[in-house]
Each structure stands twice: as structure tokens, then as C-alpha cells.
Image: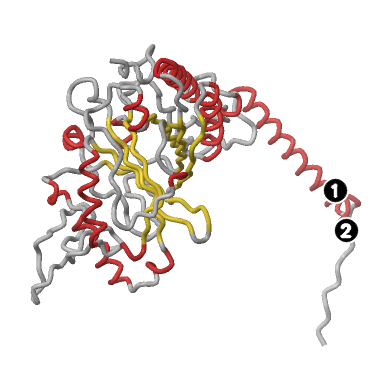
């Protein structure tokens, strides 16, 4: 029977297994030491940071901070509007308790001066220590607006006819969640920045004699650059925003003191997301007038195709139903007028989530016409409820060396 070959003993002591292993370990240690020595030498030579790879593509430089000063407020500059919306927002409203016209004007001046300094510092080189970053820039924008009651009370230089919205059928407005003499909207890349800057702004407001009225946080879903964000119904929200030429006509004020100003219409809209998303996909699309997957109108093939409100099916029915949201909000029904929409979602409780509708218009009457049509026959009405409302005259920006609201005093 075959047998295992006999293993001969080593011919010299150095070939013993234990000794061989020790030599191998010593050799490996020498290689490792050489490698460590080379790495330390490289770090000393080119000042690399330990732990950072020395091969591959360098990380892209961080985006620069968004400057506060300018002809328009930071949240509404052309560069910001051309970029994706910052994914988090916080709106804060304050009241300025009446004393006398002179005292109230002085308090408003004090507050606007303090907010100018606070908001400029938050994006400047020496912010509050809590806003210091470890390499990345603080991505923060802000806008400040005045409510119609305060403007009338102090006879401020605001556009003629600036007033609150009328009541609409179906409104279930909570006064504690809407209105206000002053409105501040902060938008940022993270909630940390919002929390710190909101605290600083509130401290300045309290010092000037203002009192907090309401606050509301909002967010966006992860959205690819250049894509339109979606709302909690799962549809793209903000597709038909105006280009720069249309914005000059419908968003910004006419040439003069208000040409870099606008009006913010804010609506807090509770959405029954469970009921709506339980509908068949086709029923959702018909209610909206667009297809959920790509945002295209029912008469088109791409998101930014113009909806054909006159297209009909062979049976004579409109392709985009008469009650579809897209039809009722269509610019064609308002002589081409468009709103600049920069909405956010909110989720405050299991039964309280929805849309923070933020639209910028030259004339709030445009929103009133649209909302009256929607309140009458929008197919989304069974799934939504307007629970808060506010209107604010958004001040022009503050160029370097000036303060917000410098034009308000006639």
C-alpha cells in the first residue's frame, strides 16, 4: 500500500519552521517601517493631512457663502433662483405692539437695522461661533417682509393697494398661525444653521420691542440639481415658474422704489396624503393634470411642455379635465401672469403635514383670482385644507453700507 513520503529533517538550524517564521516577521516589520517612514516623509514634504488619500481626484471646493448685501434680498437674487432651492426653511412672524406712530417707527427702524447686521454677519467671515464650519461654507439666505396692517398703521412707502387677502371658500384659517407685522424667512442647507440664526433674529426682535407671533419649519426631499422638487403628494411642485423676462413683468415691482421688491403670499395647506396616494395612479394624474413620474402635462411628453388646455379626447372630453389643478392655475387664464413659487413641505404631526405654499407676485390680486377658481372646483379640494395665511411686502435688498427698509419713510 502506498505510504506518505517521509519528511526529512532540516539540514541546518536556520531552516527550522520557527526560525523561518521569525525571519519573515522581521522582514515584514522592516517593510512596514519603511512604508511608515515614507508616509511620514511625504506628509512632511507636501503638508498633506494624515488620513487623506494621496491618490485619485481631489474633492470639489465648497460652494461659497451666499452674500447678504445686494439690490435684492439674498433669497431672491438671480443666482439663487437659478440654483436648486436650499432644502430647509424656517419662517418667523412677529408683531410690533402699537404705542405711538413715532415710537413704532423708531422701533421698526431699530429692528430692521439689527436684522441687517445679524443676517449679514451670519454669512460673513466672523459669525456667531456656533456657525463656524469645518471646511464647508454656510449656505444661508433670508428675506424680510412687512405685513399690511403695520404698513398702513405707520404710513410706510409700500405699493399702492397692498392689503391682506380676502377670505376664500373652504378656508379653515388659524389666526395664531398666520398674519403678522413682520415676516422673516430663512433658508439653509441644514437645520443647525436655521436654529442658530432664528435664535439670533428673535433676540434682536425682542430687543426692539417686537413679540413672536408664529414660526413654521419646512423641508424639501432630496432633489437632483436642475430637477423640480416634489410635494408630499409625490408630484413636482414649481414647474411653471417664470423666466427672468416674465419675472420682471409679474414678480418684481415696476421701475422705481419697488423694482427690487415683491409680495410674498404664504399659505399653510394641510394635505391628506394617505387618502390621495391611495387613489389609483391614473386618478391622481387626472386630478393634477400632470403625470406623477415625469411631471409632464397630460397633453405632453416632458415636464416643461406647455399644457394644451383645449385638447380633447375622441369622446369630446378634455384631456386635461375641467377640474384639474393645472388647468385652473394655468397662466392662460390670467393673461399669461405667472407666480414665482418656492414652496416647502412640512410635517408637524401624524395628521398635520402638507405644503408651505410660498409664492412671489407683483400684485396679490393675481393669487386671489387663481385661488377663487381653485376654491370653486379644484379636484384636489377633498384632499387639502388651507389652515394659515399671510401676506408680506418683501423689501428690496440692502446694498453694502445700507440697511433694509431705507426707502420706507416717505
Q: Quadrant of residue 163?
A: top left
At x 28%, y 59%, the residue is: 294
Q: How many marks?
A: 2
Say if 101 sits above or below 333 in the image.
above
State the residue in front, 271 or 194. Answer: 271
Q: Which residue is mark 1?
A: 22
Residue 241: assigned label: none
| Left or right relative to 230: residue 60 | right
Q: Which residue is mark 2?
A: 10
Q: In the image, residue 324 lies at what x, y percent?
A: 22, 63
Q: In the image, residue 376 lies at what x, y percent?
A: 23, 60
Q: In the image, residue 144 lies at what x, y percent?
A: 39, 29
User: Mark 2 Cα within 10 Å, few/some/many (few <14, many 20+)?
Assistant: few
Residue farthest to the top, as pictured = 401
Secondary structure beneath label 1: helix
Secondary structure beneath label 2: loop
Give the quarter of the figure containing the N terminus: bottom right
At x 70%, y 34%, the residue is: 36
| Left or right relative to 343: residue 322 | left
Q: Quadrant of residue 264?
A: top left
User: Mark 1 Cα within 10 Å, few/some/many (few <14, many 20+)?
Assistant: few
Give the quarter of the figure containing the C terminus: top left
State the residue in front, 196 or 293. Answer: 196
At x 79%, y 48%, the residue is: 24
Q: Quadrant of residue 166?
A: top left
* Circle 2 or circle 1, nearest the eye: 1
Q: Are marks 2 and 1 in contact (CB under 8 Å)?
A: no
Image coloring type: secondary structure
Q: CA distance from mark 2 to mark 1?
A: 16 Å
Q: Earlier in the sequence, mark 2 or mark 1?
A: 2
Amino acid at each position: 500500500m502506498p505510504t506518505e513520503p517521509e519528511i526529512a529533517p532540516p539540514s541546518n538550524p536556520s531552516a527550522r519552521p520557527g526560525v523561518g517564521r521569525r525571519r519573515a516577521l522581521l522582514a515584514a516589520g522592516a517593510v512596514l517601517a519603511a512604508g511608515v517612514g515614507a508616509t511620514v516623509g511625504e506628509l512632511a514634504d507636501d503638508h498633506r493631512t494624515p488620513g487623506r488619500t494621496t491618490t485619485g481626484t481631489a474633492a470639489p471646493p465648497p460652494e461659497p457663502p451666499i452674500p447678504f448685501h445686494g439690490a435684492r434680498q439674498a433669497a431672491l437674487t438671480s443666482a439663487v433662483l437659478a440654483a436648486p432651492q436650499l432644502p430647509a426653511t424656517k419662517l418667523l412672524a412677529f408683531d410690533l405692539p402699537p404705542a405711538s406712530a413715532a415710537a413704532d417707527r423708531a422701533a421698526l427702524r431699530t429692528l430692521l437695522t439689527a436684522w441687517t447686521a445679524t443676517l449679514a454677519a451670519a454669512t460673513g467671515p466672523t459669525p456667531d461661533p456656533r456657525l463656524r464650519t469645518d471646511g464647508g461654507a454656510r449656505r444661508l439666505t433670508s428675506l424680510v417682509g412687512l405685513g399690511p396692517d403695520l404698513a398702513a398703521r405707520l404710513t410706510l412707502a409700500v405699493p399702492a393697494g397692498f392689503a391682506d387677502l380676502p377670505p376664500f371658500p373652504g378656508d379653515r384659517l388659524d389666526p395664531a398661525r398666520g398674519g403678522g407685522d413682520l415676516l422673516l424667512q430663512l433658508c439653509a442647507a441644514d437645520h443647525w444653521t436655521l436654529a442658530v440664526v432664528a435664535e439670533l433674529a428673535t433676540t434682536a426682535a425682542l430687543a426692539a420691542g417686537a413679540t413672536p407671533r408664529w414660526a413654521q419649519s419646512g423641508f424639501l426631499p432630496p432633489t437632483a440639481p436642475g430637477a423640480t422638487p416634489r410635494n408630499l403628494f409625490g408630484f413636482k411642485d414649481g414647474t411653471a415658474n417664470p423666466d427672468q423676462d416674465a419675472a420682471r413683468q409679474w414678480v418684481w415691482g415696476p421701475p422705481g422704489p419697488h423694482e427690487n421688491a415683491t409680495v410674498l403670499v404664504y399659505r399653510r395647506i394641510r394635505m391628506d396624503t394617505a387618502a390621495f396616494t391611495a387613489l389609483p395612479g391614473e386618478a391622481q394624474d387626472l386630478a393634477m393634470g400632470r403625470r406623477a413620474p415625469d411631471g409632464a402635462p397630460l397633453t405632453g411628453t416632458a415636464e416643461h411642455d406647455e399644457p394644451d388646455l383645449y385638447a380633447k379626447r375622441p369622446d369630446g372630453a378634455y384631456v386635461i379635465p375641467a377640474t384639474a389643478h393645472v388647468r385652473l392655475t394655468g397662466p392662460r387664464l390670467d393673461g399669461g401672469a405667472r407666480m414665482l413659487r418656492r414652496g416647502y413641505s412640512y410635517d408637524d404631526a401624524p395628521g398635520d403635514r402638507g405644503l408651505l405654499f410660498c409664492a412671489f407676485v407683483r400684485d396679490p390680486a393675481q393669487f386671489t383670482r387663481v385661488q377663487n377658481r381653485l376654491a370653486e372646483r379644484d379636484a384636489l379640494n377633498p384632499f387639502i385644507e388651507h389652515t394659515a395665511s399671510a401676506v408680506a411686502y418683501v423689501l428690496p435688498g440692502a446694498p453694502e453700507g445700507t440697511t433694509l427698509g431705507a426707502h420706507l419713510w416717505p
